[in-house]
Image (cartoon, helix red, strand yellow):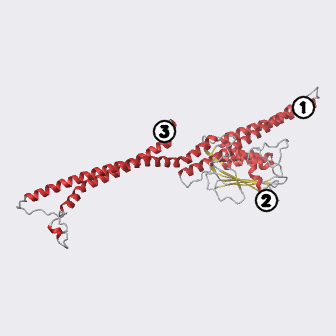
Amino acid sequence: MRAVLHSERARLTALYGSLLLLAGGGLIALINILLRNGLYTRISGAVTTTRILPPGSEASAVPGYRLPMPVPAESLAPGITPTPEQIAAWKATQDLTSRVEQATLHELLLVSLVALAVFAVLSIWLAWWMAGRVLRPLGVITETARRLSGANLHERIGLKAPPGELKRLADTFDGMLDRMEDLVGAQRRFAANAAHELRTPLAVQRAAAEIGLAGDPPPQKVARIRSKLIEVADSSQHLVESLLLLAVSEEGLEATEPVDLTALAEAELAAARATAPQDLLVVRDLAPLTVAGDRTLLGHLVRNLLANAVRHNRAGGRLEVTVSPEGVLTVSNTGPVIEPRDVPRLLEPFRRRAERQHTAGEGAGLGLSIVASIARAHGAELTARANPAPGGGLMVRVWFPAGAPAARPAGETPGA
């Protein structure tokens, strides 16, 4: 009972009921005031203009006689003294008018109080019912939020109501649940994939140490095992650094500075060409462009795009790098033909076009996901599109807020 009295429904009932009672009381008071001011005049006029002949009088006995029409009372001319009969008639008229006025006002007051009492009960009931109807969607939202947990994030309110503030609140809550479900699902997949990726090199190291170094192996075998352990350790270190970079980019930017993206792309492209195959054709078109952001993270963005384009290219392939004054960075490469439906999957962590073979130089599947995360941190929009056959490969565009984004070509998949 105490919880009900302290509920929002009770507060709204008190508010609505008070407003209705004030409106009803004000209306009754206004009627009484207006009627009181004009009632005496109307009763006095009616009394003074009425002539009554007593039954049995000579005039009423005359066949065809009709009572004369009432004549309004007139003031006596100056200097004329009223007769005693006139004074007595005036006093009787005044007394009768006052008594009729008092009786009428008394009856009106009683009727008004009874009507106000009935109206009070009815208004409180209506206020309670109306408050319940108004707050019912909030109850649905509260119950849904109370039931939610990590196991049933798929539940939605789905409020069926006319457009309004509560409908928008429920729809906003459903949209928030959609984002939370996606985020929790992504975190679970990320944790599972990270555990799997870290477990594999640890298993390789353990097997190499337990099997390869068992007994008294010759120096040549020890050297091979040593090289293998160092290779796996380097791969694990690269994976851990990539995970840390992904976590840092997801946190957003604390401070920004002007970054010459053209010079950054020049430097990263020169470093990528040093390790790229000699038969790889590199085409560049780098217009001057300065963006606001973090120089280190933007360097990782360009470096990962170029590393991905070189690693997944083909013999005698092509690599194109473009920076436009409109704020667009484009990296396109030839390579295996990619199905368009597989492109969004490549932007997720630990996702690859083919299953991992755990060979030297093979990536962990974090390159493009790191690029997408860094782009989001800079407020940029990333899209990816599979290049058609026979060239194949992938084209990735990053629109930075410094420039006005051009229209997105058909077939490109948004990634940030």
Residue 116 visible? The answer is yes
Say which residue label 1 marks. 223
**In the depicted structure, whether residue 297 falls above or below residue 27:** above
Q: CA distance from mark 3 to mark 2?
A: 69 Å
Identify the residue at image location x=75%, y=49%. 345
Q: Nearer the viewer, mark 1 or mark 2?
A: 2
Identify the residue at image location x=25%, y=56%. 39
Element assignment for label 2: loop
Q: Residues within 10 Å of mark 1 (few under 14, many from 20)?
A: few
Q: CA distance from mark 1 to mark 2?
A: 45 Å
| Relative depth, front residue between 261 and 205 | 205
Rendering coords of residue 64 (x, y %): 20, 73
Amino acid found under the numbered disc labelled 3? Leu
| Relative depth, front residue between 4 and 140 | 4
Q: Residues within 10 Å of mark 3 (few under 14, many from 20)?
A: few
Rendering coords of residue 97 (x, y %): 20, 55
| Relative depth, front residue between 351 and 61 | 61
Amino acid found under the numbered disc labelled 2? Pro
Q: Which mark is residue 242?
A: none
Element assignment for label 1: helix
Say which residue label 3 marks. 5
128 with respect to 171 (left or right): left
Say which residue label 2 marks. 388
54 with respect to 10 (left or right): left
